[in-house]
Image: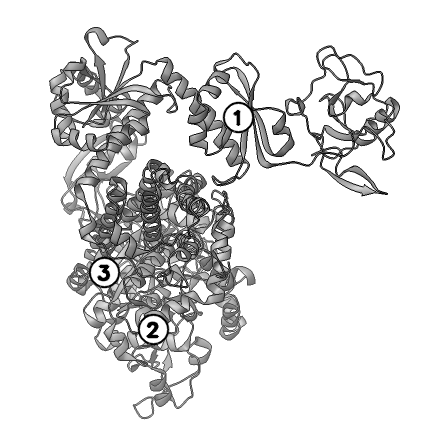
């Protein structure tokens, strides 16, 4: 799009607009003019508004989740700029961690640490570095195409050494405060990625799966009855590592005898039926509390770890054992379960400093200790373990168990719980501080903060921040071989000073080789610990690292911390939101942000997760190409997803934004320019919007006052709601305003805008519409940046005071409270309610709005309501097309009573068995009871609260008006009652027919792409000259001409001499109405005599590309004045249409179908029909044509005027 637009460009705004193509033009303008960069320059020196962008990985393309969050961020930051803030918007990239490593492992076939060691860390990390920005260009293109303004050039990447240095600084602060320790913890572990995951990572990908479940006997040693405990587990692979069993000390356990086998077992009493299928399967021998079992020893299922028998293989007690699952006896593998480890530690089964009993390698395969299953992957070993247990007589029963189980978010493989030596940040001690920091923040929606996030903080656990990986920020701890001496490094300078080595990069291949001399004489040097940071630690450190704090501009950071705003998906409550808060609270004892918007998840149309493999969602790029980015943006923002609810994404929703919002808005904008052009053409003036003239002269027209007031109210509403970050209330009000503008203001003021009320009134209407549209583009600019730019570039040419350049340079207008007229807004709202009810009633009786009705009756108990309606009654009568309006407070006068009917489907689902009684009580409600209960906004029936949508209120007429054939139709919105007299009379029916004709004419004008000021003549002819259509066309000629703004006359020969613009035959009331639109000038006619040829539909056109091209025109004479012979004519026809050898006849009449026997001069200007047989038909548009079908030109050849046809057959 070029900025070199002039007023000439405004004269014919196209009827149709390709939103996507116009967006491309706008994008080109933004790039050429550096509009985003200019916005930043424009706001420099203004108060800062800080915003943090959560860094995505660039190893994959953006999806709808990114688009949604990006749109929210873009809207809020654009709006902040409009409010007079300087908003720095830097894009960030998450470059380290599992997503990158997993891709490399997959591509290079790396199975575990041994493969990496063989390859070398330097080579491995180099491969990671190559792919880390694989899709960076695509990200920049897609993000830019979606209209998001963010700085890619001044970005931050977590792999930059300066970023990593700040991460080191953050860690050192925590280390210095004593918040870092090394320990063993049972953690979610990905065998595919060979690394532990944090608790919040493990919660990202739960799936319902079927796992094997086993009931295994644990024979008690020296028991007089030879009883055995029964343990239950869904992880048979942990049984080789069994070290204890656990029972609940307070609950009741039983010793039972299985009748079928005679075996004696001990289980929890409440689990008998679950374990044995039926209570009759066993005989209860003894009951006792679980604490009686404490300390008893048993035979473990396997003897791989028998060396621990002095402390292991005994019964422990803990209250975590519940009645809800299994046998009530829990098998304890302390290094494969959090509770197992805690309970065994408390009971001295294991010790913190002993060797870890974890016979698995990093890939989840059994090691040599488990001799029977060595080398087998744990999940694969389940069936073999069960087989061996059965052979040993220890398998009591087995089966399948469906449960929700965590999967690795990156590899999509099942996680296991496994003890891993890790570095931890202490979090559990700072729960109160975290909750206090969180209390200082504002969240939208608030319940996510109070419930989901608050509950997570209350249960916060120490955070495992280390990963046994390679591509990441190394943990800056240098340790002596004995572990007695540890140095924590907080900067590059510090490392260089202590090591004497110049440092250029902080990745493992550069720093692992650096040693720090010991401070203790004679001791070996300190070497770095092998772990790297979890990438969540990096993203949680981004507020400081993106600024290279505290190494550069520390005061600038301090002045703008915490951030004013962040936004991401609700899934980040246990991810980025959490890590940001933990680090910020630990460092500064305050939150890292002030305001947060948490959005819901975008799902496929069927409610499933969007999946590339399933292809269950439309490609975002294709959708933007089809509908435009603005439509996608508005669809996402105007949905439940901005209230942290889920959205089932449907392409139809994007299409509906075009249909219901953008096209009406564009048509109102186009209508303004059309009528400005009409005003200038008719009144010989040049229109310019003049705010001083508007203020000086003003307008007392109620609709002008209303729409201006509505605008100011909306501006006030937007200011309040955007301050509260409630996008979900703002966007519906904006779209409602577009509806009010297009479907009410423009619709009701068309005549004024067309100048029918005089030039001053026309100026008032045009000024009002211009003012509202200009305010609208400024209000909508953050939400739909492309369409508002397109409109602004043209609107500003009408106002000499408007700024040059982009709409995005404009500030958001402040509400002028003095222009808000609450009374008029209320009155218009009530008028609209009456009109809407009337339209519904017309639809019920299938009476189109074009057909006038005699009377509308408005009934309301409040006089104020009726006064409001009376003040706007002309609009009601006009919109409903009724002759008169009656206002009343007495519905009894019209015999109207209320009857209630239940919505049986809704009540049946909700009330179940009570629905029948409640339904009967609803039907028994009296008229007065229905009125009284409706006022409350709900019904109270038979002890149940019923919502208004669960009870249908039906209006019925008593007395003489009762019955199906009543003249009146009634409808209410539970506030006002409206009656519409549906009885027709001939005068009104005639006017309705006239409006039908007008409608046909206007549609034909639109089809011809004409504007109101185009000088044309419309002619009509009717197939039945005695019909009502012919009568109405003549009797209502003046009425029709006044509306269509063109001459409307019966067709005659003079019309054929004028230039034909379009013609069409339509059926109306069982007759054919033929309309032609012609110009005022006579059209050219062929210099030589001519004939038209029309070919029947059943004749095959062999050599014609367009098979529907069945017409042509020929000269009846050659250039020398010789008349064609019949054979010459046939040859011409066969040559043009390509049906040599086909049997056909040529006739002048489709009635008698008499075959033409010779060519005469009398055929000139007529149409000949080429038919195959008696059933041949001719397309209707080829009938009654008195002008050549084909395009032609007249030329002078050798002094003679001749005609040359430019196409044959005609298209």
> Marks 3 and 1, Cα distance to the nearest angstrom?
102 Å
Q: Residue under circle 2? A: 545
Residue plotted at (33% across, 42% down): 741
- Image location of residue 1199, percent across then percent down: 84, 42
- Image location of residue 878, percent across then percent down: 31, 29
Nearer-N-terminus badge (3/1): 3
In the rendered structure, the answer to whether residue 614 lies left or right of residue 1095 reads left
Badge 2 marks a residue whose secondary structure is helix
Q: Is residue 153 above or below residue 842?
A: below
Badge 3 marks a residue whose secondary structure is helix
Query: How many numbered discs?
Result: 3
> Marks 2 and 3, Cα distance to the nearest angstrom?
39 Å
Q: Quadrant of the C terminus?
A: top right
**Front residue of 791 and 369:** 791
Q: Is residue 294 visible?
A: yes
Q: Residue under circle 1? A: 1049
**Which quadrant of the figure has residue 466?**
bottom left
**Front residue of 464 and 651:** 651
Residue density around tag 3, few if under 14, some if 14–19, many if 20 or more, within 10 Å: some
Residue positioned most to the top: 960
Q: Residue under circle 3? A: 345
In the rendered structure, the answer to whether residue 28 lies left or right of residue 204 reads right
């Amino acid at each position: 799009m070029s900025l070199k637009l002039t007023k000439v460009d405004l004269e014919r705004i196209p009827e149709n607009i390709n939103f996507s193509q116009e967006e491309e033009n706008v994008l080109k303008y933004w790039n050429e003019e550096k509009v985003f960069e200019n916005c930043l320059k424009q706001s420099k020196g203004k108060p800062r508004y800080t915003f943090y962008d959560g860094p995505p990985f660039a190893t994959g393309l953006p999806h709808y989740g990114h688009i949604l969050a990006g749109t929210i961020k873009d809207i809020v930051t654009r709006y902040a700029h409009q409010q007079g803030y300087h908003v720095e918007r830097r894009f960030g990239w998450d470059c380290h961690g599992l997503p990158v490593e997993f891709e490399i492992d997959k591509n290079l076939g790396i199975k575990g640490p041994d493969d990496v060691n063989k390859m070398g860390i330097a080579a491995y990390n180099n491969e990671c570095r190559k792919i880390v920005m694989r899709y960076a260009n695509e990200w920049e293109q897609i993000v830019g195409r979606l209209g998001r303004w963010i700085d890619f050039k001044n970005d931050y990447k977590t792999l930059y050494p300066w970023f990593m240095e700040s991460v080191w600084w953050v860690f050192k602060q925590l280390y210095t405060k004593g918040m870092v320790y090394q320990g063993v913890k049972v953690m979610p572990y990905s065998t595919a990625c060979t690394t532990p995951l944090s608790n919040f990572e493990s919660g990202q990908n739960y799936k319902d799966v079927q796992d094997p479940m086993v009931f295994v006997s644990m024979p008690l040693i020296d028991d007089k009855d030879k009883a055995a405990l029964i343990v239950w587990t869904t992880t048979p692979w942990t049984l080789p590592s069994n070290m204890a069993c656990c029972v609940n000390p307070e609950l009741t356990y039983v010793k039972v005898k299985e009748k079928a086998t005679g075996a004696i077992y001990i289980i929890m009493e409440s689990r008998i039926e679950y374990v044995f299928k039926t209570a009759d399967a066993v005989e209860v021998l003894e009951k006792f509390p679980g604490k009686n079992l404490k300390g008893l020893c048993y035979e473990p299922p396997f003897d791989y770890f028998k060396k621990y028998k002095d402390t292991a293989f005994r019964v422990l007690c803990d209250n975590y054992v519940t009645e809800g699952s299994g046998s009530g006896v829990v098998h304890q593998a302390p290094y494969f379960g959090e509770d197992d480890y805690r309970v065994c530690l408390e009971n001295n089964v294991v010790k913190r400093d002993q060797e870890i009993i974890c016979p698995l390698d990093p890939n989840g395969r059994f090691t040599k200790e488990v001799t029977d299953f060595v080398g087998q992957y744990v999940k694969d070993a389940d069936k073999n373990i069960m087989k061996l247990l059965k052979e040993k007589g220890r398998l009591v029963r087995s089966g399948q168990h469906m449960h929700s189980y965590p999967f690795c978010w990156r590899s999509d493989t099942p996680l296991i719980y496994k003890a891993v030596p890790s570095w931890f940040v202490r979090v559990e001690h700072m729960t109160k501080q975290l909750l206090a920091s969180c209390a200082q923040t504002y969240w939208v929606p608030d319940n996510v903060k109070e419930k989901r996030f608050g509950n997570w903080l209350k249960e916060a656990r120490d955070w495992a921040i280390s990963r046994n990986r390679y591509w990441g920020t190394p943990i800056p701890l240098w340790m002596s071989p004995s572990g007695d001496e540890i140095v924590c490094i907080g900067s590059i300078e510090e490392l260089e000073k202590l090591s004497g080595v110049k440092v250029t990069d902080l990745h493992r291949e550069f720093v692992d080789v650096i040693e720090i001399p010991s401070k203790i004489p004679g001791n070996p040097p300190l070497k770095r610990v092998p772990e790297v940071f979890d990438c969540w630690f990096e993203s949680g450190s981004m507020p400081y690292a993106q600024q290279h704090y505290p190494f550069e501009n520390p005061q600038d950071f301090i002045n703008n911390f915490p951030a004013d705003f962040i936004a991401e998906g609700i899934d980040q409550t246990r991810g980025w939101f959490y890590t940001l808060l933990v680090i910020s609270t630990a460092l500064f004892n305050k939150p890292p942000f002030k305001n947060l918007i948490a959005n819901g998840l975008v799902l496929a149309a069927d409610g499933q997760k969007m999946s590339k493999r399933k292809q269950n969602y439309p490609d975002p790029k294709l959708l933007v190409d089809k509908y435009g980015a603005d439509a996608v943006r508005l669809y996402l923002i105007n949905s439940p997803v901005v209230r942290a609810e889920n959205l089932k994404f449907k392409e139809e929703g994007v299409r509906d934004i075009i249909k219901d919002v953008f096209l009406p808005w564009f048509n109102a904008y186009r209508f303004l320019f059309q009528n400005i052009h009409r005003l200038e053409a008719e009144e010989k003036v040049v229109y310019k919007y003049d705010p001083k003239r508007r203020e000086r002269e003003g307008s007392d027209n109620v609709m002008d006052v209303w729409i201006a007031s509505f605008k100011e109210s909306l501006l006030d509403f937007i200011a309040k709601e955007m301050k509260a970050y409630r996008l979900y209330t703002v966007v519906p009000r904006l779209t409602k305003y577009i509806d009010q503008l297009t479907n009410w203001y423009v619709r009701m003021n068309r005549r004024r805008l067309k100048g029918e009320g005089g030039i001053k009134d026309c100026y008032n209407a045009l000024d009002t519409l211009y003012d509202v549209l200009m305010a609208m583009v400024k209000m909508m600019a953050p939400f739909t940046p492309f369409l508002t730019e397109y409109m602004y570039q043209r609107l500003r040419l009408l106002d000499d005071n408007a700024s040059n350049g982009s709409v995005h340079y404009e500030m958001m207008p402040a509400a002028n409270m003095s222009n808000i007229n609450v009374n008029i807004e209320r009155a218009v709202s009530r008028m609209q309610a009456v009109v809407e009810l009337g339209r519904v009633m017309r639809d019920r009786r299938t009476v189109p709005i074009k057909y006038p009705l005699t009377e509308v009756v408005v009934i309301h108990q409040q006089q104020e309501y009726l006064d409001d309606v009376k003040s706007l009654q002309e609009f009601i009568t006009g919109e409903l097309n009724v002759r008169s309006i009656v206002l009343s407070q007495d519905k009894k006068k019209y015999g109207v009573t209320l009857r209630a009917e239940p919505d049986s489907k809704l009540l049946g689902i909700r009330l179940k068995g009570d629905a029948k009684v409640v339904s009967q009580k609803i039907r028994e409600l009296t008229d007065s009871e229905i009125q009284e209960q409706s006022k409350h906004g709900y019904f109270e029936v038979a002890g149940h609260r019923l919502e208004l949508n669960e009870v249908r209120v039906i209006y019925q007429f008593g007395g003489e008006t009762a019955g199906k054939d009543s003249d009146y139709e009634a409808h209410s919105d539970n506030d006002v009652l409206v009656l519409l007299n549906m009885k027709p009379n001939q005068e009104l029916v005639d006017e309705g027919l006239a409006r039908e004709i007008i409608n046909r004419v206007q549609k034909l004008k639109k089809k011809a792409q004409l504007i109101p000021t185009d000088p044309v003549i419309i002619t009509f002819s009717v197939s039945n000259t005695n019909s009502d259509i012919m009568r109405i066309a003549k009797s209502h000629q003046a009425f029709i001409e006044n509306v269509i703004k063109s001459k409307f006359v019966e067709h005659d020969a003079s019309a054929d001499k004028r230039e034909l613009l379009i013609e069409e035959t339509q059926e109306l009331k069982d007759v054919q109405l033929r309309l032609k639109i012609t110009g005022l000038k006579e059209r050219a006619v062929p210099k030589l005599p001519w004939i038209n040829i029309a070919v029947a539909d059943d004749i095959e056109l062999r050599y014609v590309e367009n098979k529907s091209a069945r017409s042509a025109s020929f000269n009846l004479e050659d250039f020398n004045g010789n008349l064609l012979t019949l054979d010459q004519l046939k040859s011409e026809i066969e040559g043009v249409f390509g049906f040599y050898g086909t049997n056909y006849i040529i006739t002048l009449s489709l009635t008698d179908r008499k075959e033409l026997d010779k060519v005469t001069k009398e055929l000139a200007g007529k149409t000949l029909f080429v038919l195959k047989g008696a059933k041949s038909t001719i397309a209707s548009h080829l009938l009654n044509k008195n002008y050549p079908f084909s395009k032609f030109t007249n030329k002078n050849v050798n002094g003679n005027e001749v005609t040359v046809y430019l196409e044959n057959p005609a298209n």
